[in-house]
Image (spheres, rainbow, N blue to C red):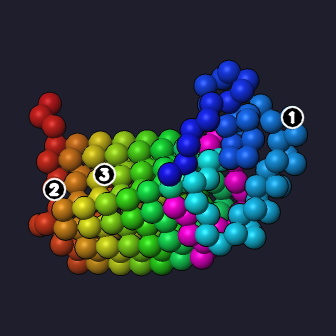
Amino acid sequence: MFIINPCAAGCGRPAITGYNLCFIHQANPEQEYNSICNYIEKNMIIKDFCVSGMRFENTNFSNHQFYGCNFKETLFVNCDFTSIKTRMSFFDFAEFVNCDFSKSDIQFLSFAGAVFYNCSFEGTELVHVNFEGASINAASFNNSNLYNSRFISADITKTSFVNCNLKRVYFASAKQEDVFFKSSNTAEALFEREEQ
């Protein structure tokens, strides 16, 4: 599991792996961004990696494996995550715009407080994944296994869960608008709402 080293500038953010500063305090952020992208491109298996607070655009993460990584508060725009395998990694308060996670194997992951816009998780294993407090808009989870995942207090809009395994999935207190569950086992999910 990654070790959180605080930024030497004293801002309280975690330092990027291999550096003593967070991404914001890097002397040459563009150079460091390119260096990190090159590292990701050359290494298909990445462990104990911290790139919290970065911005990735048009980055190819497909077919990579991530174990125990920290992507908290990171922005991903037009990124390809297809066929990734990841375990015990953190994407809390990250933002995903036009990203594709299709046909991936995602287990024991946290997307707490994350924002998703126009993203696909089609045909994906999403087992024991935490979407608590996430904002999900115009997404597709069709044909996915979401066993024992959590959408507690999530805000879900214009999203489809067609033909999904929803066994032990918690949607408690989740706000839902234009959400489709056709051919999914909704009877095995929990949809309780907090009493007003």
Which of discs 2 and 1 lies nearer the camera? The answer is 1
Q: Secondary structure at mark 3?
A: loop
Residue that extends furthest to the top in the rendered view of this protein: 10
Residue 56: name its quadrant. bottom right
Looking at numbered disc 2 in the image, what kind of residue is underneath it?
Answer: Leu
Q: Residue at x 82, y 55 (%)?
A: 35
Residue pictured at 34% horizontal, 46% vertical:
132
User: Which amino acid, mark 3?
Assistant: Phe
Q: Which mark is residue 190?
A: 2
Residue 182 visible somewhere in the drawing = no
* Residue 141 image position (x, y, % from top left): 39, 69
Give the left or right position of residue 82, taking residue 195 as reference: right
Of the numbered discs 2 and 3, the one sitting upstream in the chain is: 3
Give the magenta range. 52-67
Q: Is residue 162 magenta?
A: no
In this rendered view, identify the residue nearer to me: 8 or 194: 8
Q: Residue 171 vs residue 5: left or right?
A: left
Q: CA distance from mark 1 to mark 3?
A: 39 Å
Q: In the image, what residue type sits under mark 1?
A: Ala
Q: Secondary structure at mark 1?
A: loop
What residue is disc 1 on? 27
Q: Are marks 1 and 3 in contact (CB under 8 Å)?
A: no
Counting labels gives: 3
